[in-house]
Image (spheres, rainbow, N blue to C red):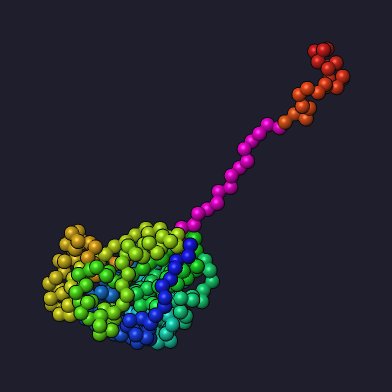
């Protein structure tokens, strides 16, 4: 099914190359480092249960390896600026666009989108490409920022500075489920996490660690980030066997039988 895409426009954060560099700097220290550690922990808990032959991460906004827990041996990273990655990541990196993946159709088992949709000018096309390259019953793992989290006041204030991650076009988990449903995906897992406010003070962030426990139980929808897994649904065509019918008699009713057959019946 086709998703009607809105009119394309430049991303509010500016050129994607600059956004990528700023996000990598944000993930390297302070609050970004804590968020990345939480995201890696959530990815580790789900990737170890997804199997196949090929796993692909589309978009590398944190210059670190986040596919460590997967049991799939062939791992690939795809990014438009793959040459800017670290030497460790360039070994498995491919250069390409998320809206036109240079990968054969139905050839990948698991695709990981790490904030790829939020910083893309055409998130609908990204999902179409994911649908194209995934094998039947393959999985897409989406990590994103929750637009209705406790970070909302900070996002209102800081988004005008055009500094990621505050300027990203955050997509709610419910909206992504609707988009995946239109592409014949089943949402099989979803979870919100990171319930602490976006503070830079390390001591204060450590003292608020209890919010992670209370938030999961009391207000789970207010987590700053979420992870969503969709499974590509393929309806198999079941062949219908023809209904068995007894073979019709070659001689219809009302026609006289041959004389030799009538003679045999009288003898019996």
Question: What is the quadrant of residue 167 in the picture?
Answer: bottom left
Which residue is found at the position 14% from the left and 70% from the top? 208
Which span of residues is magenta-colored? 232-247
Where in the figure is residue 61, as x and y percent of width and height?
Answer: 35, 79
55 drawn magenta:
no
Can residue 230 be seen here? no
The residue lying furthest to the top in this view is 267
Which residue is found at the position 32% from the left and 64% from the top? 173
- What secondary structure characterizes most of the magenta part? loop
Q: Is residue 72 left or right of residue 115?
A: right
Q: Nearer the viewer, residue 22 or 42?
A: 22
Q: Nearer the viewer, residue 101 or 175?
A: 175
Q: Nearer the viewer, residue 19 or 86?
A: 19
Question: What is the quadrant of residue 148 in the picture?
Answer: bottom left
Question: What is the quadrant of residue 140 in the picture?
Answer: bottom left
Q: Nearer the viewer, residue 222 or 121?
A: 121
Placement of 168 over or under 2, stated as above or below? below
All told, the count of numbered labels is 0
Where in the figure is residue 152, as x and y percent of width and height?
Answer: 21, 72
Which residue is found at the position 76% from the left and 24% from the top? 253
Image quadrant holding the C terminus, namely: top right
Where in the figure is residue 166, as x and y percent of width and height?
Answer: 26, 78
Placement of 61 over or under 242, stated as above or below? below
Can residue 268 be seen here? yes
The residue lying furthest to the front in this view is 7
Which residue is found at the position 49% from the left and 75% from the top? 101
């Amino acid at each position: 099914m086709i998703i009607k895409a809105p009119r394309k426009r430049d991303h509010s954060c500016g050129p994607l190359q600059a956004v990528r560099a700023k996000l990598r700097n944000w993930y390297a220290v302070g609050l970004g480092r804590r968020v990345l550690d939480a995201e890696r922990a959530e990815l580790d808990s789900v990737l170890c249960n997804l199997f196949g032959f090929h796993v692909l991460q589309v978009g590398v906004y944190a210059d670190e390896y986040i596919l460590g827990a997967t049991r799939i041996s062939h791992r690939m990273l795809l990014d438009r600026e793959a040459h800017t990655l670290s030497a460790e990541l360039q070994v498995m990196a491919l250069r390409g666009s998320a809206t036109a993946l240079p990968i054969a159709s139905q050839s990948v088992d698991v695709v990981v989108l790490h904030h790829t949709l939020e910083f893309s000018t055409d998130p609908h096309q990204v999902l179409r490409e994911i649908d194209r390259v995934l094998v039947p019953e393959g999985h897409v793992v989406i990590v994103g920022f929750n637009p209705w989290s406790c970070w909302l006041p900070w996002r209102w204030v800081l988004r005008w500075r055009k500094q990621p991650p505050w300027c990203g076009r955050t997509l709610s988990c419910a909206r992504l489920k609707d988009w995946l449903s239109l592409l014949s995906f089943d949402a099989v897992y979803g979870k919100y996490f990171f319930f602490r406010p976006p503070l830079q003070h390390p001591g204060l962030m450590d003292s608020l660690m209890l919010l992670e426990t209370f938030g999961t139980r009391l207000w789970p929808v207010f987590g700053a980030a979420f992870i969503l897994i969709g499974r590509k649904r393929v309806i198999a065509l079941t062949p219908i066997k023809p209904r068995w019918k007894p073979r019709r008699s070659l001689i219809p009713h009302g026609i006289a039988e041959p004389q030799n057959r009538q003679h045999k019946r009288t003898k019996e």
